[in-house]
Image (cartoon, rainbow, N blue to C red):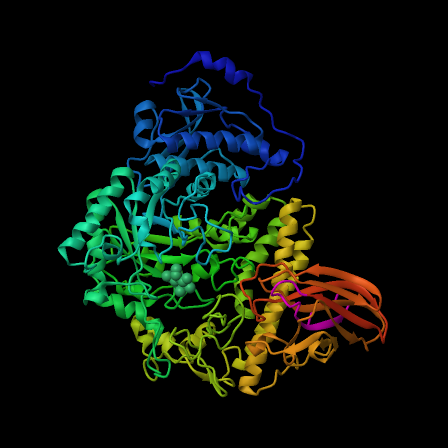
Amino acid sequence: MNIKHRPHMMHRFLTVAFIVSLVPVAAGAEDGLAAWLRYARLDAAAAQRAAQGLPMSVVTFEDSAPVQKARDELVKGIRGMLGRDLATVSALPREGGIIAGTVARLRQAVPGLSLAATVPADGYFLKTATIGGARCLVIAGESDRAVLYGAFAVLRRIALGHALTPLDERQEPAAPVRWVNEWNNIDGSIERGYGGRSIFWDGGRIRDDLSRVNDYGRLLASLGINGISINNVNANPLVLSSAFVPQVARVADVLRPWGVRLALAVDFGSPQSLGKLPTYDPLDPSVIAWWKARADDLYLAIPDFGGFVLKADSEGRVGPSAYGRSHADAANVVARALAPHGGVIFYRGFVYDHHMDWNNPKNDRARAAYDNFHPLDGQFDANAIVQIKHGPIDFQVREPASPLFGALGKTNQAIELQITQEYMGQGRHTVFLVPMWKAALDFDLHVGGAAPSPVKALVSGKTFHRPTGGFVGVSNVGLNPNWYGNHLSQANLYGFGRLAWNPDLTSQQIVDEWTRLTFGNDPLVVQTVTRIQLDSWPTYENYTGPLGLQTLTDIVGNHYGVAVEASERNGWGQWHRADDKAVGMDRSVASGTGFVGQYSAAVSKVYESVESCPDDLLLFMHHVPYTHRLHSGKTVIQYIYDSHYAGADAVERYVGDWNALRGRVDDQRFAEVAEQLTYQAGQAVVWRDAVSRWFHRASGIADARGRVDHYPDRLEAESATLAGYAVTKVTPWETASGDGAVECSAASCTATFQYTGASGPRDIVVQYFDVNTGAARFRLRVGDRVIGEWTGTDRVPTRRLDGSSSSRRTFRDVSLQKGDTIVIEGTPDAAETAALDYIETLPAGRRQR
Ligand code: GCV
């Protein structure tokens, strides 16, 4: 065997101490920046297990940046987790090493190494082998970046406590496209971003300090994500200007070592608005030449530029319809400019008319993607990919899989999944989205003849043997140290990346991995966090819009708080059509919009009939009376009530479960997650009451369990003795208890309540409004006793008293005597009026009602 040994290195290897720390690592403060790549020290037993037989050096033969990153990451990770310092060498030492490199190079450098004949694009091998009598761990990648993927996989195994020897694993990604989109504006704001300002842009240009971009590239590489577009799909034409090219090239330089290709979202009108041409008609020769010139310019500076993302003819963006051209014409003019350089265009399938006449019962936004793109199947160039949101509407809490996935047999496609939590609690609520994505990815659209054709196979190009396709996640990370504004939301990026690599992984596997990597292997922590995460989507669905109602959030506003009617009587087409007798959109072929007919016969048969339609999509597909009985036997209206109470109760349980982890999770993350879950528990009550009261009023049918509109422990602020406070209406009405709220327009005001309940310890809940226009102060007194003081400084996305600003504070174990006066003093600040909704006195420790 032809192996070069370097004896002079030997001494160094032998003197490197094999130290496995027996000292438990203190739970220091962690801010979440390292996410799942913390490389925290393993406990002694796990470290010893992983270290057994692990060589003491990393051997690389290549200078390419991704391979060097792989080497550095191995050194860093093994030092962190095992307390071992690996040597880095460029020749195989006599006692073996961790050999990391591309398959092609390793075959040359280590001829005795036997690797399978073929390795798919971006695939890698992990293999323990005896080479020249020495034990080695081989990480062999098809490409530079695949070496990096292999290194991260080894580190993941160590962190999870899996044995490294023996190892013989061949990994390949499900699809070539594994991208993220960041909807960042060039001024540094982020559309639907909840984790702070952009890590890429600031004040109309690329940031000077790109260290967070480097950190992000590392996270993406650890998941096998290989492409990123860094600006909003509602694109500013300026990004294509020559002046921007060097700036954008800086970002590409930072991401390249991590194997992540850079892309831009472009505006279809750019040839006219930026290029000053008289037209942006995709068939006009000057426009064709313009796109080509812009692409050529970019590729000069960024030879591995990934391509463009295009949103056209959608939500006010210009598109080919202006010239009577098709989406294929639009995609192809850009595709042809990119093709000579190996770039691709992602053409978004999110095209619909947001001025639809809501009076027409046949109109249906859900039909739009299929109606627009199915007729064009086969007309898109080979480097064009139609990027399709996972459901036919827009990231709602429950949607069926888009029928368009099954209707493009001759077109490349990618699924668009939303990691940022628009419509899904915006990082203020913990909602683990992987189970929702799995439901779409695993759904069989029955378009593959006898063979199953789940969405994951369609988008990966497997069903129709397409050259490319895959997965795009709308990510929107920000400068917040924990990326999304919520530590637990990081699991969504992790889950997206893992599914893009292997959509057959289960939600349980993914969350188990993520939790161990992010919070360690303490069994109680793992059990608690995985349970909360796995339960969180159905819980969110329960307290927002169950049965296929869609999220029921304020769709004409911030897409966050509850506003049951916001979707109705406007052109946006997210209608649920609830009236006094019935609820749901009739999308059947027989009597509705015909959307169901866009699916294959096997699928449409199930959705077409009320009897066979699954309950969780019933109101997405059908308009049924409130008294309709679900498969469970429960009526629709009672299900709406019960699910909302179940959802709110579940979040309150999460708070208790999380609090039991005190001391097992580092202090900073423990406190921040505790605060987030407590807030979510309060918001879940706001949602619960608003939705259940709205449907109570609409249907006139009482809750069989007597809870809705009956709150015996509540004292409404409107009925308190008010000094300075004045009663005000709240819009939408369902977001305030009773008849509204009270607002203070004086320097300070008081609301005084008489406590008439039994004497004893009570939890006092104060429901108040915290808008983002000031920092009003509040004080809670019982008689002269000050129980608590707080300031309304939360940056919730609203200036108004509504479901987003309604906030809750609970003071535990307050001793109350019958006849006590409970006083809230409110001191407004700027435009925040120290508004109050109600107080509630609950027997100490009892669930909120
Ligand atoms: C970037 C939804 C969001 C928009 C987003 C759009 C899209 O409508 O509310 O903010 O625009 O989807 O995906 O293009």
Image position of 47 with respect to 755: above or below: above
Choose top left, top right, bottom left or bottom right for residue 233.
bottom left
Please state which of residues 394 and 188 is positioned toward the viewer in this rendering.
Answer: 188
Q: Which SS type dominates the magenta stretch?
A: loop
Residue extending furthest top? 8
Q: Nearer the viewer, residue 202 or 645?
A: 202
The image quadrant where one finds the N terminus is top left
Residue 25 x %, y %: 65, 35
Quadrant location of residue 691? bottom right
Quarter of the image with the C terminus in it: bottom right
Highlighted range, magenta: 828-849
Instruction: Locate ligand 1 by image quadrant.
Output: bottom left
Q: In percent of the image, x 67 and y 81: which residue is there?
A: 710
Please provide percent x and percent y for residue 244.
32, 44
> Do we see residue 359 in this rendering?
yes
Query: Extreme left residue here?
Result: 285
